[in-house]
Image: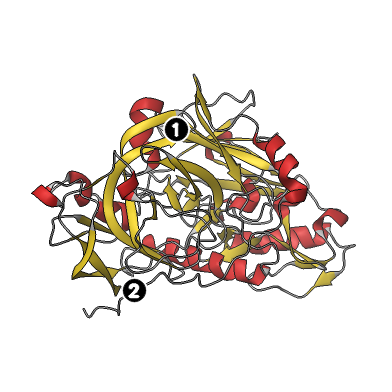
Amino acid sequence: MGSLPLLAACCSLLLTVAAPARDSTTSVCASQIGDFPHRNSSGLHLTLHHPQSPCSPAPLPSDLPFSTVLTHDDARVAHLASRLAASDPPSRRPTSLRKQKKAAGGASGGHHLDDDSLASVPLSPGTSVGVGNYVTQLGLGTPSTSYAMVVDTGSSLTWLQCSPCVVSCHRQVGPLFDPRASSTYASVRCSASQCDELQAATLNPSACSASNVCIYQASYGDSSFSVGSLSTDTVSFGSTRYPSFYYGCGQDNEGLFGRSAGLIGLARNKLSLLYQLAPSLGYSFSYCLPTAASTGYLSIGPYNTGHYYSYTPMASSSLDASLYFITLSGMSVGGSPLAVSPSEYSSLPTIIDSGTVITRLPTAVHTALSKAVAQAMAGAQRAPAFSILDTCFEGQASQLRVPTVAMAFAGGASMKLTTRNVLIDVDDSTTCLAFAPTDSTAIIGNTQQQTFSVIYDVAQSRIGFSAGGCS
């Protein structure tokens, strides 16, 4: 394949982002964050921010049109579906990256980058990181520097932008990570087993530079991508440090990533943050996804919040071993089961995902849900459909009487959804049912998960839910 032209300087974001004024929210944000991040006997605990929270270290613009959110959400869902359609492999396109130059003596820990050669690598479109992912902070290097990172249960490889960004970098909060400033940084050789594992972690093959450095390629369904050298360094959260952490040091990073420095992967894969920290913390993590007006958490390892959890087994699937599959078994509106055959709930593979905004349901289930909610809200004035959302009402969700919607899962787990989990405001005068139909892959999205504590207990192959998790 041919190579794309190289850029000598960093490019701007597809969408230029301006940080909102923080003066009026500084004290509020400080009180929300408390003593995070920290580690205790129950695990490692990090602050988690809504992508449009004024307290986020890398916020999206507060006036971002919701139609843009839905466009990127649809791109993410389309690729998640393509990953599960084994008979329909995704198309690829090439990108180019200047290769890393071998350091003096041929050591794999060299930091120097040069323009001596090119690598042309095919990129498969991957999951859109778009605008739905929540944000936390990660420390990297020795001495440690903190970076704002989006969190994604649908991705495996953790990566961030690295200086000197020989091809392109999107705009981020704070300085780029500089490998030359870290005494514990090392690039990874092509013969390392971690280089071979990139295929499963990124759905793209690895490449090898002339100086024997392993090149990763992480691509996303909205045409965003990151390409660079697979590297190892010390990762830190507060005062807790973990050496020899494998991640991508990005030299060509293009697309809509907000103003974050990169991405933390939490999928089921050897290169994910979860699996790399498991020897110290165990194979589990939990989170509470907050609203834009609150702060949540991400915990790696066991986390005893004092809440009661109802658990559903992780469903086994050969479609994609890295994703988190569960089985939806029923739904009700106002206490009444939907008028749909029980077999319809499990007619499609179902995953739970932190980065998808709008839950996708099998078409028959969605049709029954839409009808039931509309009947329960017969007194509300209907509004035209908005993008992929077909059941809309005039006004704001907080101003309407909204029925309780419950989702049931195999094993007895359930989620009793409140107004904020059922409707989503799309503009100042319209609110819509936060569900959409699909004929490919059902997805439990983050609007429905907001303010629930969700535990991914990989060791025991189960996922737990508890209401009121962010409080």
Q: Check the image and report above or below for 387 versus 418.
A: below
To which residue does mark 2 refer?
8
- What residue appears at the point 43 percent right and 44 percent down from the top-left corner? 266
In the rendered structure, find residue 284 and report the number of the disc placed on it. 1
Residue 456 in view, yes or no = no
Residue located farthest toward the top when viewing the structure as drawn: 41
Q: Identify the secondary structure beneath mark 1.
A: strand
Q: Check the image and report above or below for 301 versus 348.
A: above
Foreground of the two, 239 or 457:
239
On the image, the x and y values in percent for residue 200 come to 28, 53
Type of the residue with mark 2: Ala
- In the rendered structure, the answer to whether residue 218 lies left or right of residue 240 reads left
On the image, the x and y values in percent for residue 62 come to 69, 62
On the image, the x and y values in percent for residue 412 come to 58, 35
Type of the residue with mark 1: Ser
Q: Check the image and report above or below for 225 versus 282.
A: below
